[in-house]
Image: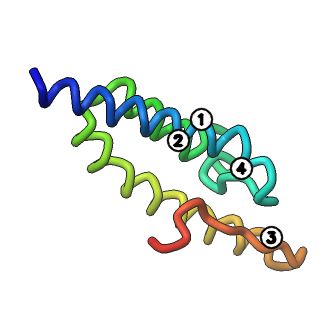
Amino acid sequence: MLASTIESFTTQAAIASLNTYQKYLSPRKGFSCPHRLLYSGESCSDYVKRLLTEQKLRTAIQMAPQRFKACKLAAQTLQTQKSEGGCIIIPCCIPL
């Protein structure tokens, strides 16, 4: 019982953090999620929020890095496509 309460609290805190990021930080960072731009789907933060609501916390944490790697590849693809225009594409997952 305690473990599920802790997991629920942690999940809700993670979702609240992502909501804060999307509302206050993301609009000011100056770039959009490359994965969303390339594939016209959800951004990485929306994807992780959805994972957190549909999966167990551990599963969401394990799946998120795969998406960030895909975002990095999307950034590289976009950078190649736009290299002649002088655009700089920054992935959501800078350290990955």
> Disc 2 versus disc 4: distance between alpha carbons?
12 Å
**C-alpha gap between disc 1 and disc 3:** 30 Å
Q: In the rendered image of this protein, does residue 51 appear above or below residue 93?
A: above
**Which circle marks residue 19 in the picture?**
1
Q: Are marks 3 and 2 in contact (CB under 8 Å)?
A: no
User: Looking at the figure, which quarter contains the N terminus?
Assistant: top left
Which residue sits at x=59%, y=60%? Answer: 92
Residue kind at label 3, given as amino acid type = Lys
Q: CA distance from mark 4 to mark 1?
A: 10 Å
Which mark is first along the chain, 4 or 2?
2
Q: Tag 1's secondary structure?
A: helix
Label 3 – label 4 distance at C-alpha: 22 Å
Q: Amino acid at mark 1?
A: Asn
Name the residue type under label 4: Ser
Please give the name of the residue rendered at 63% of the width and 45% of the height, measured from the top-left corner: 21
- First in sequence: mark 4 vs mark 1: 1
Q: Which mark is residue 63?
A: none
Looking at the image, is mark 3 or mark 2 earlier in the sequence? 2
| Mark 2 vs 1: CB contact within 8 A | yes
Callout 1: 10 Å neighbours few (<14), some, many (20+)? some
Q: Which residue is mark 4?
A: 26
Image coordinates for residue 35, horizontal then vertical, percent: 60, 52
Q: Which residue is mark 2?
A: 17
Which quadrant would residue 81 be assigned to in this image? Answer: bottom right
Specify the amino acid type for callout 2.
Ser
- Does 64 sit above or below residue 14? below
Select label 1 or label 3 by which is in front. 1
Q: Which one is nearer the viewer's eye here, 47 or 21? A: 21
